[in-house]
Amino acid sequence: MKKFESLDLYHIDSLLSEEEKMIRSSVREWVTEQFLPVIEETYQKAEFPLWVVPKLGKMGFLGSNLPEEYGCAGINNVAYGLIMQELERGDSGLRSFASVQGGLVMYPIFRWGSEEQKRYWLPKLSSGEKIGCFGLTEPDFGSNPGGMKTQVKATADSFILNGAKMWITNGSIADVAVVWAKLDGVVRGFLVEKETRGFSAPEIKNKHSLRASVTSELVFQDCEIPRENLLPETTGLKNALACLTQARYGIAWGALGAAMACYDEALNYALTRIQFDKPIGSFQLIQDKLVYMANEITKGQLLVLQLGRLKDTKQMNHVQVSMAKRNNVYHALEIARKARDILAANGIVSEYQTMRHMNNLESVKTYEGTHDIHTLIIGNYLTGIEAFS
Amino acid sequence: MKKFESLDLYHIDSLLSEEEKMIRSSVREWVTEQFLPVIEETYQKAEFPLWVVPKLGKMGFLGSNLPEEYGCAGINNVAYGLIMQELERGDSGLRSFASVQGGLVMYPIFRWGSEEQKRYWLPKLSSGEKIGCFGLTEPDFGSNPGGMKTQVKATADSFILNGAKMWITNGSIADVAVVWAKLDGVVRGFLVEKETRGFSAPEIKNKHSLRASVTSELVFQDCEIPRENLLPETTGLKNALACLTQARYGIAWGALGAAMACYDEALNYALTRIQFDKPIGSFQLIQDKLVYMANEITKGQLLVLQLGRLKDTKQMNHVQVSMAKRNNVYHALEIARKARDILAANGIVSEYQTMRHMNNLESVKTYEGTHDIHTLIIGNYLTGIEAFS
Amino acid sequence: MKKFESLDLYHIDSLLSEEEKMIRSSVREWVTEQFLPVIEETYQKAEFPLWVVPKLGKMGFLGSNLPEEYGCAGINNVAYGLIMQELERGDSGLRSFASVQGGLVMYPIFRWGSEEQKRYWLPKLSSGEKIGCFGLTEPDFGSNPGGMKTQVKATADSFILNGAKMWITNGSIADVAVVWAKLDGVVRGFLVEKETRGFSAPEIKNKHSLRASVTSELVFQDCEIPRENLLPETTGLKNALACLTQARYGIAWGALGAAMACYDEALNYALTRIQFDKPIGSFQLIQDKLVYMANEITKGQLLVLQLGRLKDTKQMNHVQVSMAKRNNVYHALEIARKARDILAANGIVSEYQTMRHMNNLESVKTYEGTHDIHTLIIGNYLTGIEAFS
Amino acid sequence: MKKFESLDLYHIDSLLSEEEKMIRSSVREWVTEQFLPVIEETYQKAEFPLWVVPKLGKMGFLGSNLPEEYGCAGINNVAYGLIMQELERGDSGLRSFASVQGGLVMYPIFRWGSEEQKRYWLPKLSSGEKIGCFGLTEPDFGSNPGGMKTQVKATADSFILNGAKMWITNGSIADVAVVWAKLDGVVRGFLVEKETRGFSAPEIKNKHSLRASVTSELVFQDCEIPRENLLPETTGLKNALACLTQARYGIAWGALGAAMACYDEALNYALTRIQFDKPIGSFQLIQDKLVYMANEITKGQLLVLQLGRLKDTKQMNHVQVSMAKRNNVYHALEIARKARDILAANGIVSEYQTMRHMNNLESVKTYEGTHDIHTLIIGNYLTGIEAFS
C-alpha cells in the first residue's frame, strides 16, 4: 500500500480537506489491516464476509452521505467517494455491498420513504443491523429496465407482487428488498421484508467474479406485503434511475481503488522481481505499462473529485456520472490487465490480488449500466439523438 | 458449437485433407459430448479431470505426431494442430495436459532419449498409462531459463539432483518428470520418476486460471536417480528450448479453439438475447465486436495452417512459432474479453464458458514465453539486435 | 526495398508460382527505379503523373486479369493482386489509377458491355491510350449509393443525363466515364465520353491525401449521350456493387504494398539512426512497433493470397472482400502511423515516404466502403441482421 | 465553434476566474474571426502567416506569463495556457510560434539573461517587433540533447560558434536565436543575431505537417558573436531542459485546442450529414467516437488546469509536465483521427480543418520530447530506474 500512498504526482491531496483525508486514512487502515489479510480465502471459497457488515456500520461507512438525524454520518460526497475508493481497494464485492446498502437501499428510503419508514429503517441499515438489497433488473430486462414485467396488484389492505428480479447483490442475505414493480402501469418502489410469504431469494452460484459477494434472484409468487410498505413518494421509473445515479457515483470512485491496488502490486513486483540480472521495472515494455496506469489513475481521480464537488453543490447530473463510471471502470480493468501481465505467472495465484480485482471489474463494468450503455447515454447527450435501439 | 462449424468464410476447410478434417471431427465430437458437459463443475472445484487421460490416450491424441513404431499415431502436424484446437475449445487445461505430455515429455524422450528409454516410455505415455511433466522454469528464472540453479552431481553410479522447479503443469500427478539441470555447467535432461526419494511435487493451489489443470512446484533435495535416467543426447539449453518450440506450436493452434468457443457462445447469445425488442446482435456496437472476432480467427487459422505445412516440410523455425503463439493467444484473449462483454451479466456465471476461457488464456499468454518475450524474440530476428536486457 | 524483399518469415513466396513472382519482380523494379525517384515531388505539387499511364499500359498492368482477346494480359488474380501491391508500394494514387481503370471501368465494360463496346474500349484502356473513371458516389449518397439522384431520360434516339457524382478518381483526366444512373427507376451503367456537351468534371483541389491522384466532381446538365452508350447488360445497382468488389479486391492487396514500404523505411531507419550511442532499433519500444508491423503484414498476405485463390476458382464472395479490404487497409494505416513515430522528426518531411503513405491511406480507408461500412457488411453476414440504419 | 463552447459537461468553466475566461474569449474571437478564414490557404501554400506576429504581440499573447516590467502581460499560467489552447484551436503552427517566442526565447532571456539583455529583448519579443528561435536539437541528437556537438570557443573579446542545429521552429524568420552550445565542456546559452557572419538558417521544405510554420536548420561556421551575447546565468544543459518544460506546458494546453476544433467539426458534421435517411450522428459507431472525444477532452482539461494551478504556486515539476504533454497530444491525435473518420471523404479536403490538425499533431507528438521519451521520463520517476538506453 505504501507506494501509492506516496504517489500523488499531481498533488491531488492538496485539493482535499483535512477531514476528507482523515476519513480516507481510517478506511484505508481498516481495509489494510483487517480486510486484506482474509479476503483472498473468502473469495476462493465464494463466501461473503458477513462479519464486515457491523464493522462497516460502526465506522459509519454505510449511507455515510445521508443526514445524521437518521443515524448516518452526514459527510460530504467527496468523503463518501473516498470511502468507496478505499473499500474497493480491498475488494469490489466489499464496495458493492456498501453501494447497495447506501446508494440503492438507504437512499430511496430517505428520498421517497415516509417519515416512519425513514425512522425505522435508516438507523438499522446505517449500523449494519439490517441488510438491504435493490430489485430492479429482471432476467429479460437488463439494459432497458423500463420493460419490467413485475406487477403489483392492490387489494383492500395490501399489495400482491408477482414477478422475478435477477442479478441482485445482497439478495439472499437481505432483511429488506427495495423492489420496483408496476402498479397500475406506473413503476413504484416497495419494501419487501425477508420472511414474507411468497418471496424467495435463491443465490446465484459458480461465479467467476465477485465471488466474495452475494448475487441472487428474487422471486415473488403472490407475495403479499402491507400497504405501508409502498415508498409513498415514488412516482415512476425515474426514481429507480436516480438510485442508479447514486450507486454509479460510488462505483466511479470505487474502481479507482481497485486500480490503485493493482498498480501498487505491479509496481512493487516490477521493482523486486529480478530477470536478466535486473528488476523487470527497468525494461521499457514494463515502464510503458506502469506509466499508462499512473496516467489514467491521475485523470480518473481528477474526474471524480470534480464530480464530487459538483454533487455537493447540486450541480451533478446523470450524464456526468455515466462518463465517470464508464471511464474509471474501463481504465481500472485495463490497469488490472496490464498489472496481471507484469506479474506474469505469479499473476494467476491468490498470493497476489490483481487477478481477483481484474475478475471483479468484469462485473463492475457490466452492472449499473454496461460500458456500451453508458456510451449511448453520453452519445445521446452530445448529439441529442437516442441510439439505443 | 454449430455456428462456428458452419462459419468458414475463407473456405479454409478446402485446404485441409479428408484425414485432417476427420481427425478434427472426432476430437470435436468427443469434446462436445463427453468433456463440455462436465468441465465447468470440475473447473469450479479446481480439480483436474483425471478420467480424460486414458481416453485421450485411447483416441491417439497424446504425442500424436510421433511415429507409430513407438505406439504413437504418426499423423502430420496440421492434424496434430487441429487436435490441439479442438481440445482447447474444451478447456485450455485439457490442451495444456496434451501439450505437456506430447510436446514437452514424449518429444524430448523421442528426440534425445536412448532407444531403451523410447521403447519403455513412449507407448506408456501415448496410451495415457503414464503421465509426464517438464521441469525447466525455476522460481527465480522465468523468462531467462539459462540462469537456472538446479544442479546435478555425478557419483559413481548415479546422479544427485538439488534445486527446485516452478509452475510445472501436471507436476503432482506425473509418473515421470523430464527435468533440466546443470551437469558440469551444461544443461542436460533427466528423467525423474514419481517415487524417487528426495523428490516432491507440491501442488500450487488457489489459482484464478487453469483451475482444471494441475500446477506444481518440483523440489529436489539430494534426489538420487540412476545413471540411465540421463537423456543421453541432450547437449545444452537449446534442447529444452526446442521442446518449447514444439509446445508453442500446439498452443498457437489451441488458442484458436478457445477463441472459437467464445465466438460461438457470444454469437448465439447475440442472436437470442432480446433487449429493446430486438436481438442485441442487431446493434452496431455488438456487430463491431463480432466482426473483430471473426476477422482475427480467420487470420489466425491461416497463420497456423501455413505454419503446420512448414513444419511438415521441415521449414519451420522458432521465430515463426513465436509469432503464431504471440498472435493467436493475444487475439484469443481479446476475443474472450469482447465475448464476455456481449454476454453482459450472464458472462460471469458458469452456465457460460467464455469467462473460464478468458481466465485460462491469462495463463496461456504467460507460459511458454510471455507476450513481451515473444515480441523481443521476433524483434531480435527483425533487427538483428537483442533487446532482452 | 532490400529489407522487405528478404523478409518472408512464413515462406509465403513458396506459395506463389514462378510466373506470379516474375510479374511481381517486374512491377517492383519499375516502381523502384522509375516511379519512386519522382513521386514525392509530384505529390508535393499535387499533380497526377500522367506519364505513367502509357507505361502501365505497355507493361500490361491495366485490367491485367481480363482476357487477352481484348488486348489484356489475361493473368490470374493473384498476379493481378501482386501488381496492385507493388504499385501501392509506390503510391496509393498510382494504385488507385490502376484500380479504377481496371476494376471500375474495364471490368463493367467487359462484363455488361456490348461486343462492340468491348472491342472498342478494352484495348485502348488496357494500353493506356484512353483513361476511364467511374461515377457512382454522389455528394449526398456516400455509404448508401442506392439513394442516388442522378437520372436518365430516354428520348427517341438518345439518353439525357442530369445529376452529379462526387469523389471520382481520374474524373478530370478521363476520356470516358462509366456512370451509374436511374433509368425508369432502375440503376443502369452508361458510357459518357469526355467532350460530351453538358458534361463537366471539375477537379477537387487542396487535398491532404492522394495528392498525386486526380479527384473530381462529375456534373451532368441535360447531358445527351447516344443510345449505344448504355451498357446493355446492366440491370441494377448490384452491377455497380460488383464493380466495387473488383476494386476492393485490388485495394486489399494494394494496402499491403503501402504497409511494406513503411515497414521497410522504418526498419532501415531504426537500424541506422543512433541515439544514446546505439541504433534506436535496439530499444524495446521500437521493436514492439516493428513486430506489430511484421505480424500484421504476414497475416494480411495470407488473407489476400487465399482470397486470390478463391477468386481464381470462382469461390470468392463480397463478404470475404469486405474483410480483406477492411483488415488490410486498417492495419496498413496503423503500420504507417507507427512507422512515422519511429522516424520521429524525419517522419514529417518528404525525404521519407511514410507520411505520404499514411495520408494516402486515410482516403483508402474511406473510399470503396469506409471501415465502419465494411464492419456492418460483415456483421450482417455473421448475424443475418442488417444494422446500417 | 459554437458547439464546444456550449459543451462543458463537468462545469470546468466554474473553476476559472472571470479574467481567465475573458482572456480565453478574446483569443477565441480573434482566432475565429481573423485567423481561421485564411489559415487553410496559407497551409496549402506552405507559408507562415507572418502578419499574425504583430497582432499576437499587440494582444499580449507572446510571453504573456512574464512580468509587466519587461513589457509582458504578467498573467497567470492558467490564462497563459488558455491562450495556447485557443491559438492551437486555430493551428498548431500558430501555437508553436507563440510557444517558441514565449517559452523558449523570452523565458531563458528572462531567467538567465543579464538585466541589459532583458531590457533590450523582452519588450521587442513581446510586441512581436522581433522574432526569436531556440537552437538545441542537432541532426544526430534528438532525444538526447546532451550529446550535442556544437562548440563555442572563447577568444579575447568574442565567442566563435561551430556546429549545426536542426528542426528549429521560426529559424529562417528569427531575428535572434537562443543557441545552446558547449563552452569548455559546459552547455551555455548564447544569443545569435540574424545577420551574424557565419550563421545561416536554411528552411526545411516539403513538410507534410506544420506547413504554416517555418522549420529550419541553423548552421554555424566560425560564427563570431560578441561576449555580451552569452546568457550569463546559464550553467548547464539543465537550463535548456527547463525551457523545454515551459514549452511543453504550453503544448499540453495547446493540443486540447486542436482536439476541440476536431471534435466540434466532427460533431457538426455528424448532426448535419444525412445517410440512410438520418444524421450519421444517430449511428452507434459514430456516437462511440464522439463519446471518446468528449471524455478525453474533459480529462485533459482537468489535467492541465490542475497543472496550471500547481505552476502558479511553484509546485509544478517536469514529470507532471511530461505526463500532460504526452497525454494531451496523444489523445488530441486520436481524436483528430476519429474525427477524420467521421468526416469520411470530406475529411481529406481543406474545406474541413480536421486533417490539417491531424497532420500538425504528428509534429507535436514528436517535438519537445517524443511520446516514447515522455513515457520513459515518467517511468523513470515511478520506478527510480532510467530505461532510456
Image (cartoon, coloured by chain):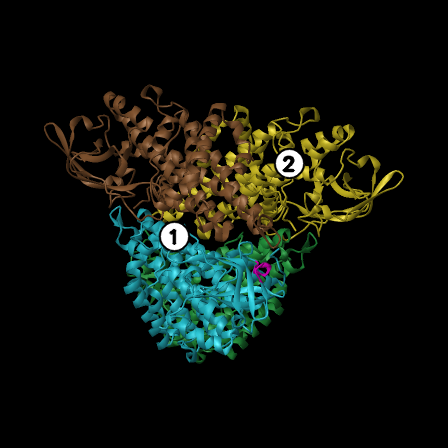
Chain colours: A cyan, B brown, C yellow, D green
Amino acid type of disc 2?
Gln
Q: Chain of mark 2?
A: C
Q: Provide the residue span drawn in magenta.
A: A144-151
x and y percentages locating residue D148 in the rendered image: 35, 56
Residue D155, by quadrant, is: bottom left
Q: Residues within 10 Å of mark 2 (few under 14, many from 20)?
A: some
- Residue with the mark numbered 2: C246
Disc 1, disc 2: CB below 8 Å?
Answer: no
x and y percentages locating residue D201 in the rendered image: 47, 58
Residue lying at the far top in this picture: please name it: B69
Q: Is residue A148 magenta?
A: yes
Q: Chain of mark 1?
A: A
Q: Residue at x 32, y 67 (%)?
A: A28
x and y percentages locating residue A55 in the rendered image: 33, 68
- Whole-angstrom CA distance, mark 1 to mark 2, is 42 Å
Residue lying at the far left in this picture: please name it: B156
Tag count: 2
x and y percentages locating residue A277 in the rendered image: 24, 47
**Mark 2 residue element:** helix
Residue D302, visible in the rendered structure: no
Amino acid type of disc 1?
Lys
Q: Nearer the viewer, residue B5 or D32?
A: B5
Residue lying at the far front in this picture: please name it: A156
- Residue with the mark numbered 1: A338
Q: Nearer the viewer, residue A204 or B212?
A: A204
Position of residue B156 in the picture relative to residue A59 (left or right): left
**Mark 1 residue element:** helix
Q: Quadrant of the C terminus of chain A?
A: bottom right
Q: Residue at x 11, y 27 (%)?
A: B157
Q: Is residue A32 magenta?
A: no
Q: Nearer the viewer, residue A314 or D5?
A: A314
